[in-house]
Every structure is written in structure tokens, then in C-alpha cells.
Image: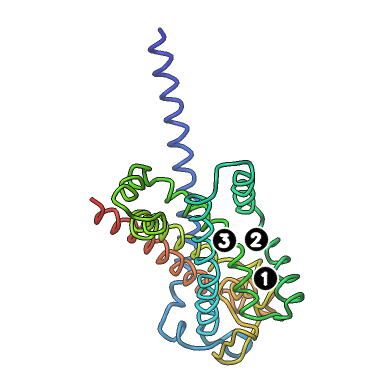
Amino acid sequence: MQHRKLRFSSIIEWGTLLTSTLLVCFFLVVVIWEIVSKGSSQLSWGFVSEVPSEGMTRGGILTPIIGTVLLTLITALFSIPFGVACAIYLQEYAEDNWLTRTIRASIRNLSGVPSIIYGLFGLALFVQAMHFGTSLIAAGLTLGLLSLPYIITTTEEALMRIPNSTREAALAVGATKFETIKDVIIPSAMSGILTGVVLTLSRAAGETAPILFTGAAFYINGTSAFINQEFMALPYHLYMLSTQHQSIDEVRPIAYGTALVLIIVVFLLNLTAFYIRYKYRKNEN
């Protein structure tokens, strides 16, 4: 009787998980099919190599692509060194006390803060207090702050997976703590660190709210982009075409094409993360 109850419970749990998975996959397929079917006709070399023209009703999306690449680069330059260094300190150097646990809890709580809050904070700090103005550097630093909690958390989890016996073996042969971390721990955790970094940057590349207040522009004539000037970015460009343009019906195909390009960019970044993880795991084996 007890065995039958356990079996019935197992079937219910398995069925619930399967139903939830199929439901999520169904809506995912519907969304992707909607974007691909309506945006694929826009994909061409001219679409990704020409600048917007005629009030963004003609031309391509080269300017938003350049802005997105530069924005992601600034985000990476700011968030990766600080995030990885913070995680190494918390995991390898900091004592396990109430202060460290409070810091970890605060970092995890920051991961759940809505991105628009980071946008308002970036507006107050980088745009106004530091006098960067609405610019590429202000938006990149804002996205860097948004990315920091994710990079710290994923890096620390990657370091946690390295067994203590590895650290003790390195110390036993005469290596210093710094040498152990630099030559043994970090290389062993590199797959997890890089995976977390790439996935975080792919998320940052698709953010709209933080750059809405800090530097994204509706339209810029030409392809020039400087860190002290406003810029165009794919997610904000898509938002404007979909909701704010004076001829929404006319630019709707361009909006679908922009959405498809953004999805492709994020997909390639995620694919890169999985490849890095696979490559490092294969080398470890």
C-alpha cells in the first residue's frame, strides 16, 4: 500500500514537471516563431550594415549595433575585474563571520533589484553627481553595477566547487596562498567563471531600463560613437520603434527585424558560454 502511494506521488510529480516544461516550451516556441516569421524578411547585409535613415523608416541598424557592442565592452571592462576580485576575496580570504554573511546576502538581494532602479541610481550617480551627462560611459557603468552581483555570485559558486583538498595539496608543496589561488584555484574554476560572465553580459546587452535614463538616444545621424556622447542601442531602438515612433505600422517590420537580430546576438553569447564550459570540462577530464 505504501509502495503504491509513493509510486502515485512520483507519477503526479513527474506529470506536473512535464506539463510545466511543455507549457513553457510552447510559449517560447510561439514567441520565437512570431519574431522569426515576421522579422526574417528584413535580414540582409544592408539591414546590418546601413545606418537608419528617413526618420528610421528606411535603412538598417548599424548605429544601434555599434552602440550595443561598445556598451557591452564598457560593461565588461568595469564589472568583470571588480566582480571576480570581490568573489575571490569573499571565498578565499574573508573569514566566515556575520559581516561576510551579511555582505553575501546583500549581494544576492541586489541580484533581485529591478533594473529600472539601477537606471535611476545611475542617473543620480554617474549622470548628475559625477557629471558624465547622458553618455555611453554613464550607461556602461550603470550596466556594470547591474552585472556585478551576478558575476560575484557565479564566480564565488565556481570557486566553492573546488575541493579544499586541492588547496591543501598546493600549500603542502610550498606554494603561497596567492600562488595557490592564481595557479590552481582560478584555472580550475575558469569554466564556471567564464560561463557566468558571458551569460551576465548577454543579459546586460538586452537591458533597456538602465540605459533609458543614462544615455540611450532615439536617433543619431551617422555611426560615430564616443564615450561622452549619447548613443543608440538595439534594445532601446526596438522599444522606440515598437511604442514611440510616429509611424508604428510603417516601422513594424524593422522592429521585428531588430528583435530577431537582438535574439541572435543573445543566443550566440549564450552558445559561447556553453561552448566555453564544454571545452574546459573536456580539458579537465
| Eye-nearest disc, 1 or 3 | 3
User: Which one is earlier in the sequence, the residue at label 1 or at label 3?
Assistant: 3
Kindly indicate the quadrant of the structure image that contains residue 246. Answer: bottom right
Q: Neighbour class for label 3 at 10 Å: few (<14), some, many (≥20)?
A: many
* Mark 2 crowdedness (10 Å alpha carbons): few <14, some 14-19, many ≥20: many
Lateral position of residue 188 relative to residue 16, left or right: left
Q: Quadrant of residue 132?
A: bottom right
Helix, strand or loop at label 2? It is helix
Q: Secondary structure at mark 3?
A: helix
- Name the side, left or right, on which 251 lies relative to 159: right
Q: Amino acid at mark 3?
A: Leu
Rounded to the nearest whole Å, what is the CA distance between mark 2 and mark 3?
Answer: 13 Å
- Observer-nearest of 3 and 200: 200
Question: Is residue 259 depicted above or below 227 in this figure?
Answer: above
Residue 136 horizontal/vertical position (percent):
61, 80
Compare marks 1 and 2 and give the one earlier in the sequence: 2
Q: CA distance from mark 1 to mark 3?
A: 30 Å
**Badge 1 element:** helix
Determine whether 58 is above or below 210 in the image. Answer: below
Q: Is residue 202 above or below residue 171?
A: below
Label at residue 115: 2
List the residue tagged with mark 3: 148
Provide residue 111's location: percent of width, then percent of height: 60, 53
Q: CA distance from mark 1 to mark 2?
A: 19 Å
Name the side, left or right, on which 191 lies relative to 283.
right
Q: Which residue is mark 1?
A: 243
Q: Residue at x 48, y 39 (%)?
A: 20
